[in-house]
Amino acid sequence: MNHDDLRDWSKRAADWAHAYHATLRDRPVRAPLVPGAVARHLPAAPPETAEPMETIFADFERIVPDGMTHWQHPRFFAYFPANAAPASMLAEQLANAMAAQGMLWQTSPAATEVEQVMVDWLRQALGLPDGFTGTLHDSATTATLSAVLTMRERALDWRGLAEGLSNLPRLRIYASAETHSSVDKAVRLSGIGQDNLVKIPTDTRNSMQPGALAEAITADRAAGYLPAGVVLCAGGTSIGAFDRIADCIEVARLHSLPVHVDAAWAGSAMICPEFRDLWAGVGGADSIVFNPHKWLGAQFDCAVQFLRDPGSQIRTLGLRPAYLATPGDEEIVNFNEWTVPLGRRFRALKLWFLIRAEGLEGLRARIRNHVAWAEDSARAIGALPGIEIVTEPSLSLFTFAMAAGDAATEALLNRINDDGRIYLTPTRTAGRLAIRVQVGQFDCTAEDVAMIPQVVGELLDK
Ligand SMILES: *Cc1c(COP(=O)(O)O)cnc(C)c1O
């Protein structure tokens, strides 16, 4: 295949993509789950000789789409969305066409400079103070790992990087039980260890108790541990819990601990000023992550980390070997020093296209609709016989269960997902199995959302 062929096949792929998207509502949202069903279609060994693209493309059409869970389906209400607005997809095509690697400013000045401006556009869009700079990562997991590594090194006065952790004091990180498993992963991978992630009790609103945080820090200090930082939850994955950000940051400040806020999902909603009370005080954080690739509409992958002062993170993650030396290193930003991987995709381009093509007003209108429709849906589901709302909507996320117990809830969820018109996923909260509903797919309409109570009602006592 050469670049002339690529042009022709790209047009064919664009036509395929258009037809795929136009007929998504006709497909079951979740792929029918039969392990091995896709692999069975593929030869076990790679071909020795070249095959015509016609055959490869035909096999793609025959094998792949039916084996996909359709994340861009307007009735995808599972997990959180991975929205891909058309403008962001177009930008990804252009970034793919140039196929650059933006590890240093000079390896693609536009990639670095568009990223700097887009991080600042997002900062303004979320109403964060103008002291914050930041960077793009692949995922919130990587951003949180970067923040926790920085907490570790700051607490150890940068001795861990050189000496390793064996002879240094045991570090402690604090978070609530509502934080995402990426926080657990970060303490594991950073060598701090799962046992040193202290899960602070939550109150009746599922928020970390600031008093309990203060007590835990004080008790750990007295016991010879070295507290290193606090990770706060702004929109938890299970039920959308929010810590009391301002109060918890105040405790952290009193104890001179840095704070990282995980708003991977809910951060998108903060482009709407009326939701910002949920994370009031966030401007006092040292690091904040949110995923434009979730609710906002930037095609996966794209996570932004805002940093009050990037110096500590650069000191933790940055290395300057001779083969990466750049003239003028002092005035320019080399973003690989802010992140874990060296190589970097040109992710900022899709933000530029997305924000311009939709406008902040367009993006806000979607999120406001999703929140309102989720509230309607929760009311309608709560009115069905035998159903209980387990957690009320937090933004556009709520959970429900069968009053009859976990077995009945699980059976209902299986019926819903086998039916295929909508897709919902489970969680456990307060010791109980619950079905999560999140409204947030980029193309969903009020009618799509109204189908949730309709389908649940139809399948209640099958
Ligand atoms: C989705 C999610 C994450 C993980 O996001 P990745 O970008 O997939 O790593 C972390 N925290 C919260 C609250 C999330 O919802």
Image (spheres, rainbow, N blue to C red):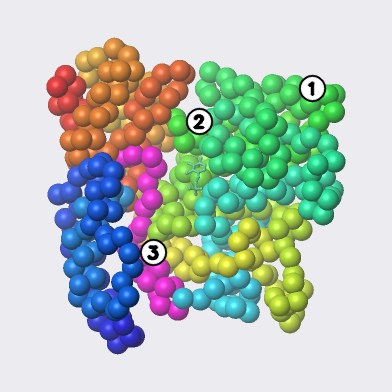
Q: Is residue 447 left or right of residue 405?
A: left
Q: Is residue 2 left or right of residue 23?
A: right
The N terminus appears in which quarter of the rendering? bottom left
The residue labelled by disc 1 is 219
Residue 223 rendering spot, x and y as whole percentages: 83, 24
In magenta, the rendered stretch is 73-98
Residue name at image x 49 percent, y 65 percent: 347
Work out whether mark 3 precedes mark 2 in sequence or the reverse, and give the earlier one.
3
- Contact check, label 1 and label 3, Cβ < 8 Å: no
User: In the structure shown, which secondary structural element does the residue marked by tag 1 occupy?
Assistant: helix
For the question of whether residue 281 can be seen, the reply is: no
Given residues 292 and 9, the one toward you in this image is 9
Q: CA distance from mark 1 to mark 3?
A: 49 Å
Residue name at image x 45 percent, y 18 percent: 431
434 to 270, vertically: above or below: above
For the question of whether residue 335 can be seen, the reply is: yes
Of labels 2 and 1, the one closer to you: 1
Q: The disc labelled 3 sits on which kind of residue?
A: Ser
Residue 312 rendering spot, x and y as whole percentages: 76, 54
Residue 142 rendering spot, x and y as whole percentages: 58, 51
User: In the structure shown, which secondary structural element does the residue marked by tag 2 occupy?
Assistant: loop
Residue 409 rendering spot, x and y as whole percentages: 30, 21
Mark 1 CB lies closer than 8 A to ligand 1: no
Q: The disc labelled 1 sits on which kind of residue?
A: Ala
Work out whether mark 2 precedes mark 1 in sequence or the reverse, and give the earlier one.
1
Q: CA distance from mark 3 to mark 2?
A: 29 Å
7 to 310, vertically: above or below: below
The residue labelled by disc 3 is 88
